[in-house]
Image (spheres, rainbow, N blue to C red):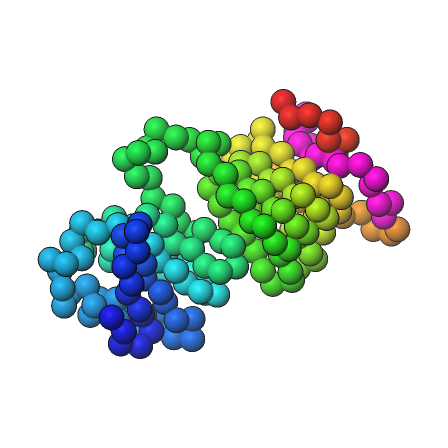
């Protein structure tokens, strides 16, 4: 079902809605409304995954997508993803309603380059590097199986027990909950062992990554 801006496809998980990145959000919203209203009975109750390609929605766009799918047309929005490795919205389904964000983990098997990012409500594992100019955000722990040289924000919803760990921990900015640490000025000594950052006594401390509490 194609009419410009939006493509709807069936999948084993339900419906996948592919959104073309070149269109303004007002056009995307209009096209979604047209498609759903033309076949209300077909779409009613369907599980929906929204794929935004390279688009990064703001809070207003996220809210409008959720309202349109969940409220106006009675479907169930499972998640909103993009091909930058981000999962912006994850709705709780009946099968995992009892799970906390600490039980969820997103694994990304590639290097994140400048301008790219990942955001997840749960633990975030990067098998690759996080280059300068890239940003990773998680409500729980962040583990980088490579070099962390970009921006990392763990415990983004206020969890001060969250950690950031990497094979080489050299972020331009590091945040845990509301605490912030920046890369020191001058020459930086490369760590030769994995390191972990965590909050102790109200400050972020970095130490050898030997084990997780």
Dividing the image into 4 quarters, which one contains the C terminus?
top right
In the image shown, does 1 or 162 lie closer to the viewer? 1
Is 67 placed left or right of 111 in the picture?
Answer: left
Q: Which residues are magenta?
A: 188-205
Residue 109 left/right relative to 189 = left
Q: Count up the numbered dots.
A: 0
Which is nearer the eye, 159 or 170? 170
Residue depicted at 50% across the width and 43% down the height: 106
Residue, far top: 213
**Residue 24 image point, x, y percent:** 38, 73
2, above or below 194, in the image: below
Residue at the (27%, 35%) spot, across then down: 94
The magenta stretch spans residue 45? no
The structure residue drawn at horizontal position 48% and vertical position 32%, both measured from the top left corner, is: 102
Residue 162: horizontal and vertical position, in percent? Answer: 58, 32
**What residue is at 57 percent from the left and 36 percent from the top?**
141
Q: Is residue 195 left or right of residue 157?
A: right
Closer to us: 55 or 125 = 125
Q: Residue 160 placed where, x, y %?
A: 58, 31
Q: Is residue 67 above or below residue 101?
A: below
Q: Quadrant of residue 189?
A: top right
């Amino acid at each position: 079902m194609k009419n410009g801006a939006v493509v709807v496809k069936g999948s084993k998980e339900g419906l996948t809605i592919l959104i073309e990145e070149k269109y303004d959000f007002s056009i995307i919203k209009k096209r979604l409304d047209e498609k759903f209203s033309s076949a209300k009975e077909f779409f009613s109750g369907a599980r929906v995954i929204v794929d935004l390609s390279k688009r990064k929605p703001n809070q207003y766009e996220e809210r409008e997508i959720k309202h349109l799918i969940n409220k106006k047309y009675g479907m169930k929005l499972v998640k909103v993803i993009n091909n930058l490795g981000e999962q912006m919205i994850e709705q709780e389904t009946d099968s995992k309603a009892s799970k906390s964000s600490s039980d969820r983990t997103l694994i990304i098997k590639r290097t994140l380059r400048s301008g790219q990012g990942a955001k997840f409500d749960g633990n975030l594992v990067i098998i690759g590097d996080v280059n300068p100019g890239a940003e990773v955000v998680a409500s729980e722990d962040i583990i980088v199986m490579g070099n962390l040289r970009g921006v990392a924000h763990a415990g983004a919803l206020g969890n001060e027990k969250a950690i950031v760990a990497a094979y080489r921990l050299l972020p331009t900015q590091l945040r845990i909950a509301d605490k912030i640490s920046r890369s020191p000025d001058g020459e930086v000594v490369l760590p030769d062992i994995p390191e972990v950052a965590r909050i102790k006594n109200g400050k972020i401390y970095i130490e050898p990554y030997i084990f997780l509490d």
